[in-house]
Amino acid sequence: MKKYLFLVFVILGFSYGETLDEVLSKALESGIVKGKQYEVKSFEGEIIKAKSFQNPEVYVELGRLISKGSSSLNLTELSVSQPLTLYGLRKYRINEAKSVLEAANYNYELFLNDYKAQVYRLFFESLYKKELLKITKQELEFSKSLYDFVKKTYELGEVTKIDLFRSEKEFNLAKTNYEKSVAEYRESLKRLSSIVGFEVSDVEGDFYSLKDLQNIDFGQHPEVRFYQKTIEALSYQENYYRALSKPQFSVGFITKEATKSNYESGVFISATIPAFYRYTGELVSIRNRKLKYENLTEYALKSLKLRYESILQTYEYLKQQLDKIDREVLSTLEKQLQLSEKSYKLKVITLFELTSIKNEYFQTLRFKLEIIDTIHKNYAEYIKIGGQVW
């Protein structure tokens, strides 16, 4: 057992820990992020398609004449026509495609915010487990030192067997807690590795450093801008269908057989007149989709502001509680523990009193870590709604 613990101490003491900057930089080059980037780039093809003109339409008519003992195949008519893109049809299609591309970029930013928040959260969860491991190691060392002292004094006949059993129990419990902390730290690194797409064997950073929350311009938030750009694209699409409901013209060239082996040629203009169906169904659908995104825009603005206010209030409250623990609780408990250890060795207090103070001190240290961990969870939510990582 001692050999096992020694190896763990050595590994943790000399292993290279990756910082948040290093982990996040590598994560932003991972397959899932690259995949999202190519998903956005795929919309560039829609702009190219919108800029291209319609292909000309070709009509060919062939006639086969069959008589007794002979047959022939003759071209009787050939026409080539080019549809005209009038009423701004091409412009509406191009602008719609550009708006869809911009909306896709904002959707990508929204994904990045969420992804960075996940990485930040799991990184600081690992850092929390690592700090917890340090505390359990400190508690283990204290319990081991106390057990060795009690064992020696018991052998000299200065303490009862009850004290020996109590100190041994505290030492064994400290060993169990330490082994549990080692396992939890390793498990947290696996969770972090699974989200970033590469193995993180150790993390390094200042767990106790807390950043201030900055104001966020929610009018430019990716979610809000995504809805706005989608509405813009739908407006161009609406104009496009309105233009299609007008007569559509084509110009072309035609040649046809007038008499045997004699052809006539000329140019023509043709038009389609939408006398009945004028894309009413498409226009109704677009109008309702625009109303949907207009309502989502309004909802997102209100929701984001409320979430920010809630995060800010919780953040400030937790920092106050943390300051209170440092000033009013931990400093007193630390002095009390040092004094109690000396008092027990001088036989002024009992082992029960000493272990009670020891347990209270280390429990308070854990509670402090829990508060800081909650603050980092809160900061991850801040990143998710558009806050900066650094």
Image (cartoon, helix red, strand yellow):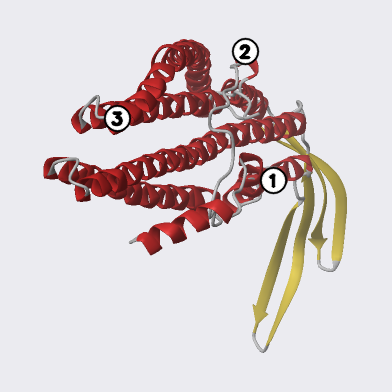
**Foreground of the two, 303 or 373:** 373
Crowding near the residue tagged with mark 2, few <14, some 14–19, many ≥20 C-alpha atoms within 10 Å: few
Disc 3 element: loop
Percent of width and height locating residue 275 = 58, 27
Residue type highlighted by circle 2: Asn
Observer-side mark, 1 or 2, equals 2
Q: Look at 64% across and 45% down and name the residue there.
A: 28
Mark 2, residue position: 215
- For residue 346, which numbered disc appears in the image? 3
Count of number-bearing discs: 3
Report the mark closest to the observer, 1 or 3.
3
Of the residues under marks 1 and 3, which one precedes in the sequence? 1
Q: CA distance from mark 1 to mark 2?
A: 31 Å
User: Of the numbered discs in the image, which one, if any, rests on residue 3?
Assistant: none
Q: Are marks 3 and 2 in contact (CB under 8 Å)?
A: no
Query: Which quarter of the rendering shows the N terminus?
Result: bottom left
Mark with earlier residue (1, 2): 1
Secondary structure, mark 2, is: loop
Instruction: Check disc 3: other Cα within 10 Å, few if <14, some if 14-19, many if 20+.
Output: few
Q: For mark 1, what is the residue?
A: 41
In terms of image quadrants, where is residue 235? top right
Q: Is residue 316 left or right of residue 21?
A: left
- The front one of 330 and 384 is 330
